[in-house]
Amino acid sequence: MEMRFRLARLMALCAALVVAYAVPSAAQVAEGRIDVTVSDSTGAVLPGVAVDIAGPQTRTAITDATGEAHFLNLAPGTYSVTAKIQGFSDYVNNSVPVAVGAAVPLKVSMAIAGVSTQVQVSAETPTLDVRKTTTTTHVTVEELQNVPSARDPWVVMQTVPGIIVDRVNVGGSESGQQSNYMAKGAAGRDNTWNMDGVAITDMAATGATPTYYSFDLFQEMQVTTGGADVKSATPGVQLNMVLKSGSNTPHGSASGYFENEKLQSTNIPSDLVARLGGGTGKGNRMHQYKDWGGEIGGPIIKDKLWGWGFEGKTHVDLLSLIGSHDKTDLHNSSLKFTGQATPDLRANFIGRGASATRPPETTYDQSGPTNLYKGEGNFVFGNDLFLSAKYGHVKGGFQLVGHGGADKNWWIDDSGVNFGSVDTYKTKRPQDNFSLDANSFHGKHELKFGFGYRKAQVDSTDAYPGSGIITIHIGYPDMEALIKRDTATKTDGVYWNVYGGDTITLNRATINLGARWDRQLGSLGAGSVPANKTFPNILPAVSTSPVKNAIVWNSFTPRIGVTYAADENRKTLLRGTYAMFASQLGSADASFISTIQYTGIYYYAVDLNGNHVADANEILFNLGNAGYYGFDPSNPGKLETNNRIGKYTTPVTHEVTAGIDHELMTNFGVSATFTYRYMNHFDWQPLIGVNGTNYHQTGTLTGSIDPIGSFSVPFYAIDPAVVPPGAGHSYEQRPGYHQRYIGLEGSATKRLSNHWMARFGFSTNSHREYFDGLQALGDRTPTATSPNKDGGLVITRTGGSGKSNIYMVLPQYQFIANGLYQGPLGFNFGGNWSLRQGYAEPFFRSSVSAGDVLGRKSVLVVDDVGKFRLPYVSSLDVRVEKAFKIQRTTLALDLDVFNIGNAATVLGRTYDIRLTGATGFNQVLEIMNPRIARVGVRFNF
């Protein structure tokens, strides 16, 4: 594959001011907080104490009548805290770590002044957060920079218990590609992406990121997978990435990393060399990897204005099996300015640009860029009211151009391999969002409330190459001709939310109560597409009219969280939460009601001239069509949609968690969480007026083949009399259907101290679906993605971004561990290990003739999609570093080795028993990339 990437340049800067929230949201917050409670040696609270903090930011506050002072919206990092009042010795703590979205409950005890006028304390900053109501993992800058990884957000997420990712990234072999991921039964479309507290999720490819990233941008990442935070809207994985920023102390860094073929081993087994070895006999290879970047920050006006900037580029050049190059170039630039007009008013300005291009013949060239802008205003009123306003704009969009060109025909052989060219997809996806948040302190109560508005637009086209016919071999020279019409989508999604909550602090208990209301609206815009190039009479030009608020989701979702300290020292916390989440509506979902749909009609054909494609004179129209979708063949130019909007609701998830946190020792905490989820009110799009009762058995697929053994599976066809005009579908609630998730996870985190840090985790998961009768089914024929088994495992097929035919079933076991040890003489050692159960092998047969007027079937030939699985995946990466330090300057030379055991684990096979040849049934399609070393140099001050 060849990738050509356009340079994405920074377009503008945005303004942002900084205030704070109480109980920071795991979803949309870029800062943490310190909550100080001051008392004397008898335990009596001390009002009027001057508390100063210094570090990435400086602040001053006076304790109130309850002895409390709150510092909100603090940039992540390490702070010093000083407390002073006449008659008492000064209190100083120079090591208070602040993480994104976390609160540090700092207890300050002041002694009557004596001989010493200052009391230095250390190692007393608590590891546990009594206000925490979420299941959250904090990945610090120390871990990001010192633990060996492939340096993208997806490899960070796969180190979080409960999250699974569809690919294995060995030393950057998958960098520049978006991974698919999920956790705890939540659909991938419910994942969210946030940068510096602003939502940036691509709402067209709902749940995906709109751009690509350079690793050195980030100060910290925070990953949340559940809990009762009132600002968390969805049940999906919520990733919050925080950019670095300027401060009063000048600082900066530069880094470069390099890999090539000479630093790589060979791991392809001898039995796979003939099929997967390619021209080199070594299989897929990393030809070259380069990653460089630099950032600098510091004061422009001391204590008033700070600046920070970054520039970086990543180049990935993979060597495919046939010896062609698959190149990706990612460019990132960012600027951030932070100002403080008064102690109660701060501002930061952020502008960021990024682009990625991706793609021989049936691959894509992708180009960007994506630009992000943010403005934030934060205000402090006295000691008890904080307001924050944010605005963000994402100038999203990209194009996927078929590398083979628009003039070549697209055909697929009997092994399922594509030839010729592919479609060309172009899209614009701008979005704007605004939010206002407030926190107010009243004794034992901390009130939080706010609202948000967001608009995400989509303007996309998809055009098919050559004759507009996709040829599918079904036992060459027999073929199927799929006649296609181009598509166009113009839609938008508008999102409103209002929330409120109260955090009640008692002696040992902390109670969080809250609720949110969300309103999501999807609208359709006008559009048109041309006729099929070869057969305009079969698929003529069509247009669609606009529909305002075609889909509207309203939801009211309560949240409850209780934390109880089991001991007086708050070293053991018991946690319980209940939360109801609503799914998020895609900004392109209203396209369902458009006249312009993904449209096609099948005819049989026989190749007469040996060119492998169905020419017009080779199509057997006399046999009638072999199936169709997206239009009415009896009225192909109809300007009214065949689909309809029926009775629907907002999909929701009910979640209950129970957990325990314990501080084993200073800077070392462990945690365990049990999670139960019940998901219902799913929407689906069945044929209008049709469910499982309208399908009747027309045959049984039988056979015996290794490794499956014997199978006998019934298949079904629809009653022709109930097929709606144009095979129209209805958008409606799915009756009698729900899903259930049960999981247990554990983690242990050792903060960097005494020359070492570590993070460990495990999870076990069960995600199943349930059907209350045939009304909950459509076609009763079991398929790889719809097994139709009551109480069976939920399976998700992922595709796109260079991957296909990965069938994700949540693993029954998953383990992760990583860490850093700072040795003598400047030698440092890091490691990163992960292990999970292999994904499903849902064997099936495609193109089964079931006598269905709507076309052929794919039939699942195993009774349980979890019965056959790929091998478990285990990967160990290590780092050896030599650091040279002179005062505030450090130069580090890194040697990273990925897949150090040179494992050749099978990651994908062909599951279709119909396919033959080198890529036919049960043939290995992918193994882990081999061991590779990466050399790096880092400089920082």
Image: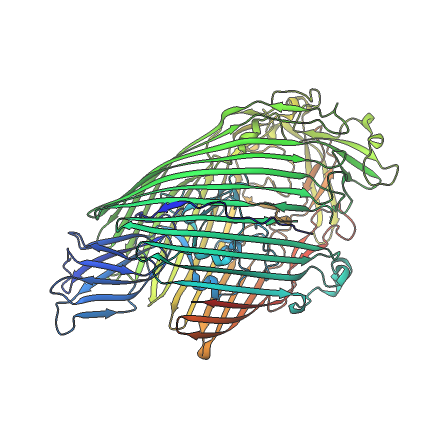
Q: Is residue 897 visible?
A: yes
Image height check: is 863 above or below 885? above
Q: Residue furthest front?
A: 301
Image height check: is 915 above or below 89? above
Q: Nearer the viewer, residue 464 or 274?
A: 464
From the viewer's perspective, is 828 left or right of 35? Answer: right
From the viewer's perspective, is 379 left or right of 219? Answer: left
Q: Nearer the viewer, residue 406 or 199?
A: 406
Q: Quadrant of residue 612?
A: top right
Q: Quadrant of residue 698?
A: top right
Q: Nearer the viewer, residue 749 or 824?
A: 824
What residue is shown at x 21% (from left), y 57% (from top)?
Answer: 37
Q: Is residue 598 visible?
A: no
From the viewer's perspective, is 480 left or right of 153? Answer: right
Q: Position of residue 67 (x, y in %)?
A: 18, 55
Q: Position of residue 576 (x, y in %)?
A: 34, 50
Image height check: is 284 above or below 405? below
Q: Residue furthest bottom?
A: 825
Q: Residue furthest right?
A: 609
Q: Position of residue 544 (x, y in %)?
A: 60, 24
